[in-house]
Amino acid sequence: MRLDETESGKGRFVNFSLEYFDRISVFGRSTLFLALILVLNIAFTSIHVWQEWKGKKWPLYRVFGAIVGFWFPRPIGFALFTLGLAVLQWALGIVAYSGYLPLLGMVPTSIAVGALGATLGARVGDSIISHWTLALAGYLPNPGLSSTCVVCV
């Protein structure tokens, strides 16, 4: 019996995710490439968030607060900019590439495609606006700057 013919929830998840991945990628119904892209999404996001948290002088929320003129208390800055952004980007990436949201299950294709656009837009926008433009304007050190090229790929 093939996996996509099973009645189990796991079989439906794998089948749905591979069908969705086939529609959004050049890799077809490849479990290997889907898994690789999901792992890379989580790894690159983790590296970028870690760099933003462990900036050379200050974490990202201190730099951001200084630019916009707001001081974030450490627990709020850490919760919003380090934990919150990481969890949001991980979840958005999982939905974007697999069409599945842990704890909720499969999502409609329109939501998954929207998540794909949001993921790509967030990565490119963060790199250009929050890192490259600010670095060129002299806002240095810029936590996370060195990982933006990898994250955009």
Image: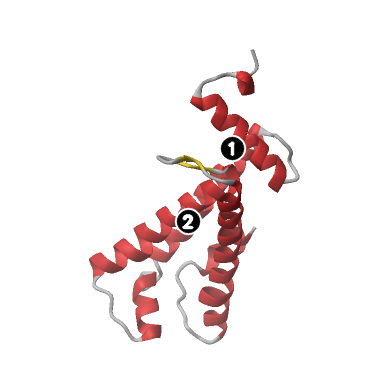
Q: Position of residue 89 (x, y in %)?
A: 47, 56
**SS at badge 2:** helix
Of 133 and 89, which appears nearest the observer?
A: 89
Q: Residues within 10 Å of mark 1 (few under 14, many from 20)?
A: few
- Residue 5 visible in the picture: yes
Q: Amino acid at mark 1?
A: Ala
Colouring scheme, one of rainbow, by chain, secondary structure, one colour: secondary structure
Rendered-image quadrant of the N terminus = top right
Q: Amino acid at mark 2?
A: Gln
- Asked if labels 2 and 1 touch by Cβ distance under 8 angstroms, the answer is no
Q: Residue at x 26, y 67 (%)?
A: 76
Q: Which residue is mark 2?
A: 89
**SS at badge 1:** helix
Instruction: Indicate the quadrant where residue 39 lies.
Output: top right
Q: Residue at x 53, y 53 (%)?
A: 44
Residue 134: assigned label: none
Q: Which residue is mark 1?
A: 35
Rendered-image quadrant of the C terminus = bottom right
Q: Earlier in the sequence, mark 1 or mark 2?
A: 1
Q: Position of residue 148 (x, y in %)?
A: 56, 65
Instruction: Indicate the quadrant where residue 64 lies.
Output: bottom left
